[in-house]
Image (cartoon, rainbow, N blue to C red):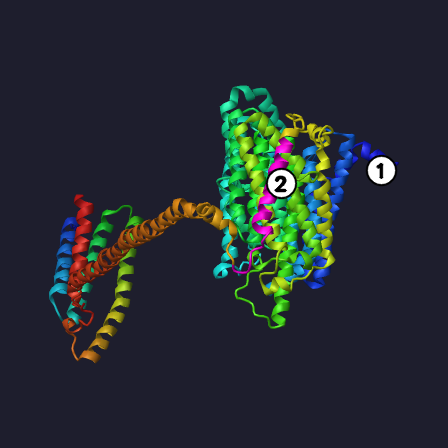
Amino acid sequence: MVLLEVVQGGGLFAYAPLIIALPILGLITNIIFGRRLGERFTGIVASGAVALAFVIAIMQFLALQAVPEGATVPIAEWISVGSLSIPWSIKVDTLSTTMMLMVTGVSTLIHIYAIGYMHEDVRFQGDPGRYARFFIFFNLFVAAMMVLVSADNYLMMFVGWEGVGLCSYLLIGFWYEKGEDGIGNAVAGKKAFVTNRIGDFGFLIAMFLIFGAVGSLGFEDVFHWAHAFGGENVLLISVITLFMLLGVAGKSAQLPLFVWLPDAMAGPTPVSALIHAATMVTAGVYLIVRSNPLFSVTASTSNIVAIVGTATAFFAATIAVGQFDIKRVLAYSTISQLGFMVAAAGLGAYVAAIFHLINHAFFKALLFLASGSVIQGVEAGHHHAEHEGADIEEPFDPQDMRNMGGLRSRMKITFWVYLIGALALSGFPPLAGFFSKDEILADARLENPAMFFLLLAAAFLTTFYMGRQVFLVFFGKARSEPAAHAKENPPVMWVPLIILGVLSVIAGALNLPKIHTLTDWLGDTIEHVHVTEFSFSVAGLAVVFSTVAVVLAWTIYGRKPIEKGEPDPLRKFLGPIFVGMENKWWVDELYEFLIIRPYIAICWFLADVVDWRFWHDWFHDSVLGAAYRNGSRWLAWVFDLRVIDGIGNGLGNITNWGSQRLRVLQTGYVRNYALAVLVGGVLVLSYFIFG
Amino acid sequence: MNIPPDYVLTLSGILFALGVIGVLIRRNAIVIFMSIELMLNSANLALIAFARTLAPAQEALRGHVFVFFVIAVAAAEVAVGLALIVAIFRSKESIDVDEVSSLRG
């Protein structure tokens, strides 16, 4: 009863700060005790901290049932300068709580999975001491993500935004001494960081403009302003939202800043699942949805957002078709799905964006974790095969799908959850992806037919590349010795997979057609919700497309599985197009040519010509150095020797000369002195007498 | 007989000038010494002459007292001066003052 009263009174909001504090507590505990008390302790503390944060999120959810408009929980005054006042306070409303629930829930599962995964990974990579470090970074990430989603002003959100970026960087480069040339992973981390900086620049500029216009960074002030004065400030708001879009493009890996996400797969697989699929990359979508009062004022920016999202969705989907690395396929798939979400947000379908965000978090985390399970199974098989002295081609890549095949029978649980994830992503009813993707497609059809067809094509490609992946990995015969010896992983890894699998199946129930639970729920926070009715024609079309894609994938990859060393059959059909897909349409090369080379050339110019030759050689050495040397020489040889010494010696010489003259007077003859006395006496007397 | 003071002072001046000349031109230490005595006594003479111009008689005593002082000091000076001359003679075998010029610069 007491609990009920607390719930109804909204008193549970007071616990909200714990959602940030708990992961921080976990990471501090692990910093102090993690190494000493071993892996079991570390894993339990880290997972427990996040699980407790999930409990707190559930408490906020319960509290919101009674008080739907939510609450702002102040923690501390943060920045207070003049009229600028930025508190550190937590905004609990339906939108932020949705994100909290999703992030902490998925994080808990991935933390548990990582207990098992990292146990193997640190041994495979040869440094078991890094186990605790992984969980410290992981908890830090959850804390930063909580700051991001619970912020009640843009600056606090930016702190979380940067915090997750930092954790992303740290975790991409977790095995920083590995990868291509021994620096590949570090380079990938740097690439992610630098690309995100470009986006952050946009976010910062947007914040500056908001502060300049509104005089505050608090969400409520800004949104009130947008309501009251939005009409007369459309141009300013367009500029603000466009800069925000730049931030979104960086964080959520949209065109043209998506290039970092595929490289981010250098991080351990739980990192790819948590940060680079389920949570961090959705921060951009969250930013748009959170700022919906700004975006809904300006139709032009919303259009651009939708175009960027649609283009990304289609573009990334084409690349995913041509990839062979199991994680890279999923990475491009993530970019493509983020494109769907951004497109939805651009079309004003904010609820659909969040709906897809949640579903995507479930099934993409599932797919990544399952791919991690596959990779580790193959690695275990590699180890096993080596033990038996089998002939393995070196270097062996455990992530290359061409080395896999036939894993269905050896990794049964992984196969089934992978299949569920793939079907959910492909949008087959009644799995999660079906409902959210169709909501987006239905919105697109109403708003813009061209976008609708592009998104439909992207959905078709999604199903096709997922079918390709499933057939390549799990069907046919093993194409390498390690794959032939692969074995299933321990329960600590497959139990989270099954939970995520169940969630991927049922998450569509969050916002069923006609019932619209999520729409009503988010309607308390988002002002511009519109209910898009379920359209059988759209859904039917999507399902038909997906079915065709599966049949096509089966025809190409399933009916006659490719043999070891055989090229991808798609290469024959598509020719140069496949080469383009395989090489990611040379976007990296294009950026290399357009940006990085000129940038490096400018850096070289600045360093070599401006800094070294002009500044160092000429200015410092020739101008300053020479001036100093000449000045010192003049001071030493001219001023000191001639003037200073001249004064000293001159005084001596004058005294000497005078003395030489004066000594003549000292004759030593008494009468001379007497005469002098006489003359003196006479002179004195004369003075008195005549003067 | 009342000799006017101008005469006495003139004599005193002449004696003083003789003494000065003696000090300046003679080389014999004894003669120089005598010339100094001459100058002292010319000054005494001048003092006596001035004393006589003063009245009443008690005032004149001041000049006489001066003279006695000078005579006493001269006596002491003679003792020191002759002792110096003897010391010089012992070391130089001569009382020529030009011989004693070791303070020459």
Question: Decide: marks 2, 1 in contact (CB < 8 A)?
Answer: no
Expressed as whole percent of the image width and height from the top left, the position of residue A678 reads: 17, 57
In percent of the image, x 51 and y 35: which residue is there?
A308
Q: Quadrant of the N terminus of chain A?
A: top right
Q: Amino acid at mark 2?
A: Thr
Would residue A145 appear left or right of B11 to someone viewing this image? right
Q: Amino acid at mark 1?
A: Leu
The secondary element bearing badge 2 is classed as: helix
Would residue A306 appear left or right of B9 to someone viewing this image? right
Mark 2 belongs to which subunit? A
Is residue A606 visible in the rendered structure shown here? Answer: yes
Is disc 1 on the same chain as disc 2? yes
Above/below status of A35 relative to A358: below
Q: Residues within 10 Å of mark 1 (few under 14, many from 20)?
A: few
Would residue A637 appear left or right of A291 to someone viewing this image? left
Q: Total marks drawn?
A: 2
Above/below status of A416 relative to A666: above
Expressed as whole percent of the image width and height from the top left, the position of residue A76 reads: 67, 38
In percent of the image, x 24 and y 73: which residue is there?
B84
Closer to the camera in the image, A678 or A169: A169
Residue A547, numbered label? 2
The secondary element bearing badge 1 is classed as: helix
Magenta region: A538-565
Give the residue at mark 1.
A3
Q: Quadrant of residue A129?
A: bottom right
Expressed as whole percent of the image width and height from the top left, the position of residue A268 reads: 60, 55
Closer to the camera in the image, A16 or A430: A430
Q: Is residue A542 within the magenta segment?
A: yes
Viewer-nearest of discs 2 and 1: 2
